[in-house]
Image: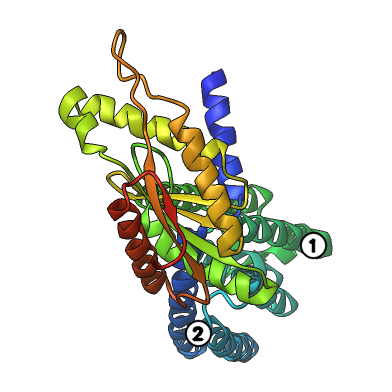
Amino acid sequence: MHATGGRLRDIAVSLLSRPDEIMLEVGAGGELLVARLRAVLAAMLLLLPLFNAIGGGTIRETLIGLGGAIFVNVFAQLWLVLARRPRRYRWLPFATAGFDVTATTLVLIALAFEHLPASLNSLIVWCGYILSILLTALRSDGRVTLFAGGLAIAQYSLLALAVFALASSPEQLISTDYGAVTPGGQGQRVMLLVMVALITAMVVYRMQRLIEMSGTDGLTRLPNRTWLVHRIQRLFDAVRHDGGSLTLALIDLDHFKRINDENGHHAGDRALRHVVAVLREQTGATEWLVRLGGEEFVLLLRKPLGTAWEQVDAIRQVLAERPFEPGRGADPLRLTFSAGLAGYPQEGADLSRLLRRADHRLQQAKQQGRNRVVARDG
């Protein structure tokens, strides 16, 4: 039971936390997809007043439906324009999710002025809440899903309480077209909204875990190349906005293949984890260590090239002073690395150019005898 409670807390914390860079990129694409889908659905809403009129609905109900459809269409086009600028407006997913929910509530309120039972028993309009919550799954952000779900539950609950308070007699809550409005029936609808919100949140959580796995190295639990490709542009933007410098260090362990050949791949995996532990100890919270693959790593430092060289060289010395023990009774192995550094934006305005410049200097370090850090072209 304790384990289950802990697991649920972990899920809740994950859903309420800001997604990582990969999830934010996926969510930005999802927001644009939602905007396009919303525009299509909004256009389809224009047909509902026509169907209502053909089905014998009153003129006032038809006009209310038409007015609501036009209102939704105008804002759908606005959200579409804003969504075409991915991640420029951080508030956009919350604003659009809130709009989708509130638009449904406003239509139900308008129906209440015409006919009280219609405001709570109009199943077609009420399904707008369900669609609003389900659409948040495409944004890949648990915070947006929980926000939309909580808003829908709160607004509909308040609407139901208001309708019951306004009804002067039970007969006012009975309709030949919409049936009887009962507390039990409304309670069931609120519970359905809770269930839809929870299920959608779990879908988002599952998506987050799968995408997190795609951006995380399985052996070392470090971010991988996929994470780097998505994250680096944000770091570039931060440097341009805040000033300062960014240095990319390309690190390659020296003669690492010998460990795998002489001690086995299991020892090689343990050696990699040993190296990662040392590197992590020597880096700060605003510095990022990424495993590109094999024995190759990238270290991102918010420092100028010269200062970054001093830090990376100090890390190299610390690693050399902490030998790795491949097994009981085996001689400790001294691990070293070679590294090449490149600075943004002076030596490369994108990740590809920085990696090429850093790799060129890494090869110089190897040619000069390995176990050294090179920050300038020789």
Give the x, y percent position of residue 164.
Answer: 77, 59
Disc 1 designates what residue? 162
Give the x, y percent position of residue 249.
Answer: 45, 57
* Number of numbered callouts drawn: 2
Give the x, y percent position of residue 10.
Answer: 56, 36
Q: Quadrant of residue 66?
A: bottom right
The amino acid type of the residue labelled 2 equals Arg
Q: Quadrant of residue 18?
A: bottom right
Rendered position, 4 above or below 137: above
Label 2 residue SS: loop
- Distance between the alpha carbons at the discs numbered 2 and 1: 39 Å
Q: Visible in this render: residue 177?
A: no
The crowding category of the residue bearing disc 2, from other C-alpha atoms within 10 Å (few below 14, some 14 to 19, many at least 20), is some
What residue is shown at x 38% (from left), y 52% (from top)?
224
The amino acid type of the residue labelled 1 equals Ala
Label 1 residue SS: helix
Q: Nearer the viewer, residue 290 or 109?
A: 290
Residue 84: mark: 2
